[in-house]
Image (cartoon, rainbow, N blue to C red):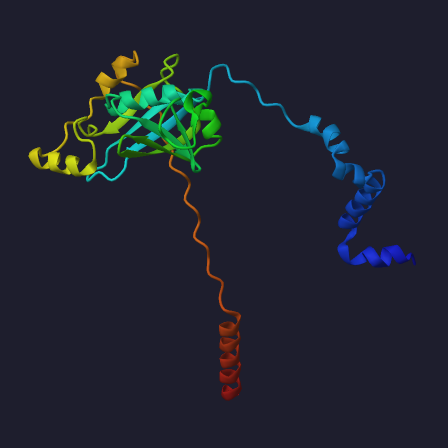
């Protein structure tokens, strides 16, 4: 009997055939060339090319003012290739700020600010786009306007824009931003004592600035799928103890 057959017998006939095919293929490959990168360049042509989009992809972005007693947030749409200085202008419009204070962006401890800004170790924001900072969905950024900190979440980098060709507009929001006269949170808390609640956010007035009139048919935003609960495996010692008790009980019954 063939010794090779006896050696490969435990792995089964199907796996044996696959193993033999792999062995034959491996005999023709010089793995030293693979490690050096000579063969990887030949195989790179197998990748399926990405079809170019007919329009610039849009991003769905949510921004929230940090630390306020009541949530103040906006959800808006911008093109993925928007520069950071233009993104600053969109944020000012949707939030209702007046642009009287310095601003900066931050992602992964790297700051971006206008040229000549006093922010230390900041890169010029005109040289970077949102695509440079958010390469995938759920990317988080920080936006600072004066003493007001904002959290930015790029919820989607391939959002279906329902009002194309308008590249930027606001989808929804809650409450107006703090008045420009309030430079910090302490002044804002004192301001809230004089009013019951901030005025409602005027979505139509904001979208008129972007040139969008009328209501927007907002596509449904699907929440992220929930993870299945992990089933706890029984303890093998407990299982062994139950089997021993069962064996003892059967022995006593006999």
| Residue in front for this viewpoint, 183 or 20 | 183
Q: Position of residue 107 (x, y in %)?
A: 42, 34
Is residue 234 something one can see in this rendering? yes
Q: In the image, is 73 to the left or to the right of 31?
A: left
Q: Position of residue 199 (x, y in %)?
A: 14, 27
Q: Position of residue 105 (x, y in %)?
A: 38, 30
Q: Which residue is located at x 73 percent, y 33 percent?
A: 40
| Residue in front for this viewpoint, 77 or 148 | 148
Q: Is residue 146 above or below residue 162?
A: below
Which residue ends up furthest to the right in the rendered image?
A: 1
Q: Which residue is located at x 23 percent, y 23 percent?
A: 96
Q: Quadrant of residue 210?
A: top left
Is residue 160 something one can see in this rendering? no
Q: Quadrant of residue 71?
A: top left
Quadrant showing the N terminus: bottom right
Q: Is residue 1 above or below residue 66?
A: below
Q: In the image, is 212 to the left or to the right of 58?
A: left
| Residue in front for this viewpoint, 174 or 186 | 186
């Amino acid at each position: 009997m063939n010794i090779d057959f006896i050696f490969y017998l435990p792995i089964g006939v199907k796996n044996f055939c696959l193993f033999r095919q792999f062995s034959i293929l491996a005999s023709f490959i010089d793995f030293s060339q693979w490690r050096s990168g000579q063969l990887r360049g030949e195989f790179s042509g197998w990748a399926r090319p990405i079809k170019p989009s007919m329009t610039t992809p849009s991003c769905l972005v949510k921004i929230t003012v940090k630390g306020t007693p009541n949530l103040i947030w906006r959800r808006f749409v911008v093109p993925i290739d928007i520069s950071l200085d233009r993104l600053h202008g969109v944020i000012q419009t949707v939030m209702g700020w007046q642009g009287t204070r310095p601003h900066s962006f931050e992602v992964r401890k790297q700051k971006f600010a206008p040229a000549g800004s006093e922010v230390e170790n900041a890169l010029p924001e005109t040289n970077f786009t949102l695509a440079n900072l958010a390469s995938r969905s759920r990317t988080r950024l920080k936006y600072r306007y004066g003493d007001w900190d904002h959290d930015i979440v790029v919820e989607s980098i391939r959002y279906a824009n329902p009002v194309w060709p308008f590249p930027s507009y606001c989808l929804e929001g809650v409450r107006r931003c703090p008045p420009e006269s309030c430079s910090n949170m302490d002044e804002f808390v004192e301001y809230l004592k004089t009013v019951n609640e901030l005025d409602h956010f005027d979505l139509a007035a904001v979208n008129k600035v972007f040139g969008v009139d009328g209501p927007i048919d907002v596509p449904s935003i699907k929440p992220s799928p929930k993870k299945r609960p992990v089933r706890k495996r029984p303890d093998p010692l407990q299982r062994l103890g139950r089997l021993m008790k069962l064996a003892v009980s059967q022995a006593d019954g006999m």
